[in-house]
Amino acid sequence: MASRLDSPFDLERCGPAVDLALEKVNEKFLAHHNVELQKVQGSYPSCSGALAPGLAADMHFKDDVIAFIGPACAFALEPVARLAAYWNTPIITGMGDQPPSEGELAAPASVVSRMHRLRNLRKGTRTLFNDKGKYPTLTRMSYCQCRLPRVFTSVFERFGWTHVALLLDKSDLFSLTVGKSLEWGLRKEGVLKAVRELDGNERESCEALLRDVSMYARVVILSVRGSLVREFLLAAHSLGMTRGEWAFLDVEIFQGGYWGETGWAAGDERDAAARAAYEALLRVSLKLPTGDRFDDFADTVRTKAKHHYNYTFSDGEEVNFFIGAFYDGVYLLGMALNETLTEGGDIRDGRNITRRMWGRDFHGITGHVRIDAVGDRDADYAILDLDPVTGKFEVVAFYHGLNMSYKPVAGKAIHWPGGRRGPPPDKPRCGFLGNDPMCQGGNT
């Protein structure tokens, strides 16, 4: 894993979870086989596709490891997952679908090229690891961007929206990969009516782009970096698009500053307008683990991080979903090893071990865990809405990955802007161009 990267999934945060899971696996699954797993640890200083495979090779040849836990960042994971496939070794990550933050990009040119070629792919909802035939021993324990189109579709179906536009920042890797997954999936569903790509590093006119897509839709997905979400919503506010006749959506997979600030407050003279504008936004995020079991786990992770990794979680910093996903990944490996040993199998047969991990359910530290037939988790997502009183985003609904359904939170209602009691209509009364015959001749 990357170390001291100050990411939500670096060694100092996730290492304690791996240690806790190893203790549990050895005690619960392997002790009666007279087998004990021991950790071999290696780290690197950046999200690098150059250093990580070298470390993996050292572990394979010098330490004869039977499984890899990590890397987390996609650019480091990709070459290691290819090597693991060649070596027939299971590789498990609590992350794996995420480009690095701005300023942390240290990837081979071939990987960057494949990320940017996503815009030209036509077959399937593509992400970097979409072709699991190339990564037959890779299991991802957090989520797959390939599910996001279905999450958004569940929202659209709930509110009767069939005309949707997508604004996509092609200069930001997270926005690019998410946006391209959404573009293909929503076109397949028949709801995406307009896509506009922009370069977030250039001073493109947010107003002009919003006027453009207004000819096709009143529901707009903003697959752009957090600072641009604010700029687009402020532009929409100035154009009168945040009064309840429009809806905006964005993606914040993980709450925190690592991928940029995503809130309305910037400490400037536009904060009041931004707060009002954000009332028109619905946000899609991973469902966070809750409950006493996870709280106890989080407390233990904090203690181990301080004592064994010289890291202190800051005030207000949560033990996040990905940390729990690493724990669940090691736990799942333990279950597969136990079954293999019980049946007299070879625990060095990585493909066999991996097959036992795929297509199964269990109750993990992060809640219900279902790994699909190709090794990706069917994650649950939260739909968040800005409370106009508190100015904070609150969960108003969940998307359940197991049955692919949208479910409102009891006692919570979406605060539609402009005092409206319901969502904006799918089509304006007079049409997107205002030229519907029923509105002509003064009959408005």
Image: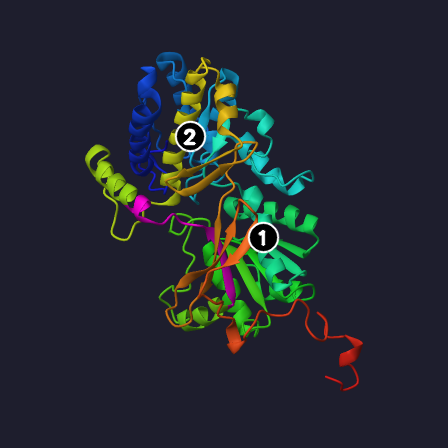
How many numbered marks appear? 2
Q: Please state which of the two labelled residues, at mark 2 or mark 1, is closer to the viewer.
A: 2
Question: Of marks 2 and 1, which one's residue comes earlier in the chain?
Answer: 1
**228 shown above or below 56:** below
The answer to whether 168 appears left or right of 271 in the picture is: right
Distance in Å between CA atoms under marks 2 and 1: 36 Å
Q: Amino acid at mark 2?
A: Leu
The residue lying toward the viewer, choosing from 188 and 170, is 188
Which element type, helix, strand or loop, lies under badge 2? helix
Q: Amino acid at mark 1?
A: Leu
In the rendered image, the quadrant that contains the C terminus is bottom right
> x, y (%) of residue 369?
46, 39
Q: Residue at x 45, y 26 (%)?
A: 91
**17 shown above or below 55:** below
**166 shown above or below 425:** above
Residue at the extreme bottom = 442
Q: Residue at x 41, y 24 (%)?
A: 68
> x, y (%) of residue 171?
54, 47
Q: Quadrant of residue 270?
A: bottom left
The answer to whether 308 appears left or right of 421 in the picture is: left
> x, y (%) of residue 31?
31, 20
Residue stretch in magenta: 280-295
For mark 2, what is the residue? 332
The residue lying toward the viewer, choosing from 226 and 64, is 64
In the rendered image, the quadrant that contains the N terminus is top left
The residue lying toward the viewer, choosing from 181 and 22, is 22
Tell whether position 208 is magenta: no
Q: Residue at x 39, y 42 (%)?
A: 366
Residue 391 is labelled as: none
For mark 1, what is the residue? 168
Residue at the extreme left = 307
